[in-house]
Image (spheres, grey):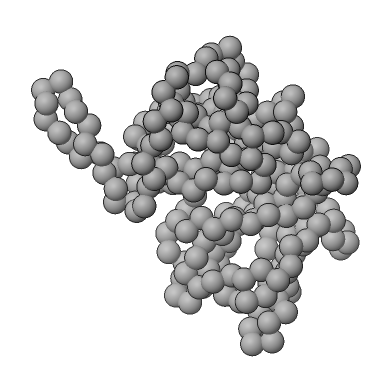
Amino acid sequence: MKTKNYLGLSTKIICALFAITLTFSACKKDWNDDPIEAAGIGFVHASPGTAALDYILDNQKIGSFTYNNDKGYFAAYPGTRLVGVSKKDSLKYLTNGTAALKGGSFYSVFVVDTLKSTKLLLVEDDLKAPETDKAKIRFINLSPGSSPFDLQVSNTDPASLTASFLLTTNKAFKDFSAFSSINPSISYNFEIRQTGTTAAVANLNNVKIEKGKIYTIWAKGLKTATDSTKLSLSIMTNK
């Protein structure tokens, strides 16, 4: 996905997408305005050791973000869109690619791998409401060079009926699970294990999962690192 393309100079920020019913009016040559249902697209910086990046949609710089930072959803016209990232304030892409966006659908673009081999991972987000009194959650392995992971979930809230269970198994780098229903709780513990083992290699504890919300939890960082880029878990709220 490496290119020699250069970015446009416009830095107009695309309006944030607040609801799936948001529409754009697209001016046509005959001046008739037909409403177009927007797609939602979000960017997440998950490239360990990579400094701040600018994220771009259709050669338009939208904004900047740092490692482990997500920017929520932005509105985009449906169809084939060009997405990419550059080093902050640079006019040259680090990497880019095309994304086929459907009106009314939501997508996350994860910037993954290390600086020398930066890649984009486009994932469609299922933001349909969870079952009654439930939440939804999925797992993505974004740790470069890692072995496949299982995600173990446990609950330390005595008021909850949920105990310990495997949410998903055998997820290699850039693999992801579908969203699964989960009971809300004030105190979930998440841990990743190399597939086929029982020892945790990273964990995220005392996480509150709220009824009606949708989450993504991902493995990030490098298994050989000991600094801020070490293997760990992160979570974001999709909705």
Residue nearest the viewer, comparing 119 with 193: 119
Residue at image x 58%, y 17%?
92
Vertical order, 212 against 106 (above or below): below
Vertical order, 143 against 117 (above or below): below
Q: Is residue 75 left or right of residue 218?
A: left
Q: Quadrant of the N terminus?
A: top right
Q: Quadrant of residue 114?
A: top right
Q: Position of residue 20 (x, y in %)?
A: 34, 51
- The extreme top residue here reads 4
Residue nearest the viewer, comparing 166 with 72: 72
Residue nearest the viewer, comparing 68 with 80: 68
Q: Quadrant of residue 3?
A: top right
Vertical order, 238 against 86 (above or below): below
Q: Quadrant of residue 233?
A: bottom right
Residue at image x 73%, y 47%?
220
Residue at image x 69%, y 58%?
168
Q: Position of residue 139 (x, y in %)?
A: 65, 54
Q: Is residue 28 left or right of residue 137?
A: left
Visible residue check, residue 124: no
Q: How many marks?
A: 0
Q: Is residue 202 left or right of residue 67?
A: right
- The extreme front residue here reads 89
Visible residue check, residue 84: yes
Q: Position of residue 133 (x, y in %)?
A: 48, 77
Residue nearest the viewer, comparing 36 with 196: 36
Residue at image x 52%, y 45%?
71
Vertical order, 89 against 204 (above or below): above
Q: Position of residue 188 (x, y in %)?
A: 68, 72
